[in-house]
Image (spheres, rainbow, N blue to C red):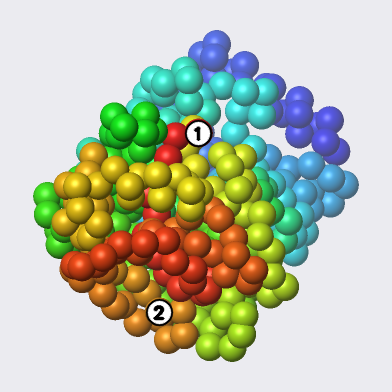
Amino acid sequence: MRQHFFYLFLLIISIGAAAQNVGVGTSNPPSKLTTVGTASNPSIPGATSTGVLRVGIGTNNDEGVDFGKSETQPYSGWVQSGFNGITADPLSLQPLGGSVGIGVLAPNASAALDVTSTTRGFLPPRMTWAQRDAIATPAEGLIIICTDCGTKGLHQYINGAWQAVTSSNTGNYGTVVNPVTGKVWLDRNLGATQVATSPTDAASYGDIYQWGRNADGHQIRTSGITTTQSSSFFTSNGLFVTNSTSPYNWLSPVETHMWSGTSAENNPCPSGFRIPTAAEWEQERRTWSSNDGNGAFASPLKLPMAGYREGSYGLLNGEGNNGSYWSSTIYSNNSRFLNFYNSGASILISNRAEGLSVRCIQD
């Protein structure tokens, strides 16, 4: 039977090429081959085609690709591949390679898919947090839009976990050098939109990280909170973890390796940069013109008093009055940080559930 259909198809093509336009379901075909049928809504191809045109295989014609035109708004044209009206099969374009274009006649040769428009955007699949996590064996680099995650918007599957796509570690950062120490630093805090113009410049405050966490969205000042500790050091929910029980950590069991050097698993800094050690912060502090918030801002780093986020309740505090900057140095179940305010500055220790600023140093 399949052989007969094949010969019939070749006959139709040869007639159209040699003589005139050929029509199926029409006596006035406008093209070399025109197939006309009743519009229908798409369904998985079965033994009976739901489309206007079918490419079918199988003894009972139960496998196929149907082409059709919807009979209801918005009257879309459609293509569906499937089996026996039950299973939707994969549908491939350019299986041997080549560029596919949408809105463009000559897609860019460097692109597998070239979507061109000046009036429309690209809309990835939208789903809830639960639906995202229910995706079976997601591929590395898979992208979706999460509609109810702690950080809404684009999420990507990287290194075996979902994470929000944020700008905190990919911003337009410059660098500054302390001529006394010779150290090279980023010119602003992670997540800041500009270099500080004053100690209380809100646009220079940037994000606030819980110690050792990756940039999954929790560092955004307005991120949601949860009281559920993470069981993995790589997080993807975008929520700030509050904890009022010793050892006051967002992670259980406790781990300490996540911010050690440029190759650290959760290093939020741009390539070639890392979280400074407590000793490096102390070295910088000793070069300030005054040991306080004014000295921090007057330094080459122009450190603002960006405040912090409480680890117990997730409340923002100290904006414009206090500067708190993480180091990579651990101290028992805590970590060291640089602290400064209007009348003093020193290296202190803090529990790791606290949210503090991050300024990166070149390795």
Q: Please, what is the three-letter code of the amino acid marked with disc 2?
A: Glu
Is residue 246 in view? yes
Q: Residue at x 41, y 50 (%)?
A: 282
Give the quarter of the figure containing the N terminus: top right
Is residue 302 in view? no
The numbered dot on residue 323 is: none
In the displayed structure image, the side of residue 29 where residue 1 appears, left or right: right
Question: Considering depth in this image, is 6 or 310 the residue closer to the camera?
Answer: 310
SS at mark 2?
Answer: loop
Q: Residue at x 72, y 73 (%)?
A: 253
Residue 260 place in picture, x, y as percent: 60, 48
Asked which quadrant contains residue 284, the reply is top left
Q: Please, what is the three-letter code of the amino acid marked with disc 1?
A: Asp
Q: Residue at x 37, y 74 (%)?
A: 309
**276 versus 177 height, above or below:** below
In the displayed structure image, the side of residue 185 where residue 88 appears, left or right: right
Crowding at mark 1 (Cα within 10 Å: few <14, some 14-19, many 20+): some
Residue 166 place in picture, x, y as percent: 41, 53
Q: Which residue carries the number 2 mark?
A: 310
Residue 277 place in picture, x, y as percent: 50, 49
The mark that comes first in sequence, 1 or 2, is 2
Marks 1 and 2, how far apart at CA: 30 Å
Crowding at mark 2 (Cα within 10 Å: few <14, some 14-19, many 20+): some
Q: Which residue carries the number 1 mark?
A: 363
Question: Considering depth in this image, is 260 or 35 the residue closer to the camera?
Answer: 260
Please say if the residues under marks 1 and 2 sit with CB atoms less than 8 Å apart: no
Question: Considering depth in this image, is 187 or 194 the residue closer to the camera?
Answer: 187
**266 versus 93 height, above or below:** below
Q: Residue at x 48, y 48 (%)?
A: 279
